[in-house]
Amino acid sequence: MRQWFADGVFRTVLRNAGYLASGKLVGALLGLVALACAGRGLSLTQFGVLMIIHTYASGAGGLVKFQTWQYIVRYATPALHHGDGKQARDVIRFAFGLDLASGLVGMIGAMALLPFLAGYFGIGGDYLWIAMAYCTLIPTMTEATATGSLRVLDRFDLIAQQQVVTPFLRGSGAAIAYAGGFGLPGFVLAWYVADLLGDLALWGFAVRELKRRGMLDALRPGMFGVARRLPEAWKFVWTTNAAHSVYAAWGPLSNLVVATILGPVAAGLYKIASTLLDSATKPADLLRKGYYPEIMRLDPRDPRPWLLGVRTGLLAGGLGLLVVAVVLLGGKPLIALVFGQKYLPAFDLLRLMVFSLAIQMATFPLESLLYMAGRQGAALIAQIVAVAAYLTLLAILTHRFGLNGAGVAYLLGSVAVASCMLVPTLIAYRRRATLPWPPIRVEPA
């Protein structure tokens, strides 16, 4: 273990994760305040509708938006490492153009489909206009360029600061809605304002940092012209967009499937359990966000980045086992304290889902290693196979066993993702001597 911490890259990963953890911890507590106010200020049905409105918009954004932060980290990081500022600017310009285009397409598509889908999701006619208005957030949700730019520039401290903004505003707004008795419209407004201002804060940090580095021109959006100078651009973003759209839609689609089969009350209980579980998996997410940019500076032909993946995976897996124990011991009283006795059935679901924590946390480096090796196609296939299996199991088991079936399906889905990612990662490691480095070179305009 002492040798692990002697590795400067490993220490950097932990440092960046520490920055992000500081913001996530505060954000998680404030997020619980918002959910507690909503849970106590709304009926079970209204709470479920609030969660469905939010997950519909975030799910639509996740399906259409390009995961451009992946592209920025993958190619701008080695470009800056090798002193190629022009390529780094082109990468960010291309990503920004995709963010703008996909955000607008997502908003228009979500609003057009909502009148036909609202009834299936349990959104009554009285709340349809509220859900339509909430969809206008989708363009600002495509903040991947800002996130990727800050990660490449090693400003994880700014990302940590931004992570507090949205939950703080949401918690404050939810408290006002609860105290004022503003009902469902008041809570939807609190969620809307918090998401909007939180996303704008992230963009503000990115603009300020790029200006300080003399790279503000990187935020001139460009697509087709810029892509001609980046030969891997379209192939990479289409593949990663498909893979991460599938992954990003995992949570929202799960909630919508449960809502369709069991109704808004069950959807609200499922949302509580999945939110607590998502909060518990944050340590792995924070390590991944710090790990990915660092390995992009390393030669994938060398064993070092792969060994770093093993070490961080083992560390995260150990933390996962501790978190599982904490959730099993403290989950029930926490739900009762925060949400109230009427939401205690969510713990029975959480108790089934929680064992996926250790699996998800221990295997988080696999996807980043595949991107480092240029095997994004293999990551896409793994995601599609695993999520298709999960959604099939979710529909079947939920229909047959109710919420308990949804919990078992979630656990089996985590096993499927880990298995499908592990196989191509091992193959890429065995063939690492053939990997190109650096990943791309700028071609003449």
Image: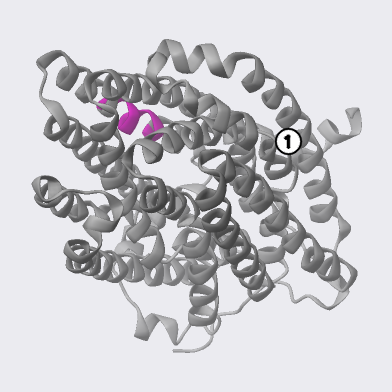
Q: Amino acid at mark 1?
A: Ala
Q: Which residues are magenta?
A: 162-169
Q: Is residue 123 left or right of residue 323?
A: left
Q: Is residue 177 magenta?
A: no
Q: Position of residue 159 (x, y in %)?
A: 44, 38
Q: Is residue 168 magenta?
A: yes
Picture quadrant where residue 200 is located: top left
Foreground residue among 394 and 30: 394
Q: Is residue 67 left or right of residue 180?
A: right
Picture quadrant where residue 362 is located: top right
Foreground residue among 419 and 19: 419
Q: Quadrant of the C terminus?
A: bottom left
The residue at 66%/45% (across/down) is 411
Secondary structure of the magenta portion, mostly?
helix
The residue at 64%/44% (across/down) is 408
The residue at 47%/51% (across/down) is 254
Looking at the image, residue 184 lies above or below residue 81: above
The residue at 51%/48% (across/down) is 151
Q: Position of residue 321 (x, y in %)?
A: 75, 28
Q: Position of residue 135 (x, y in %)?
A: 21, 54
10 Å neighbourhood of mark 1: few (<14), some, or many (≥20)?
many
Looking at the image, residue 338 lies above or below residue 160: above
The answer to whether any part of residue 419 appears in the image is: yes
The residue to which callout 1 is attached is: 316
Picture quadrant where residue 286 is located: top right
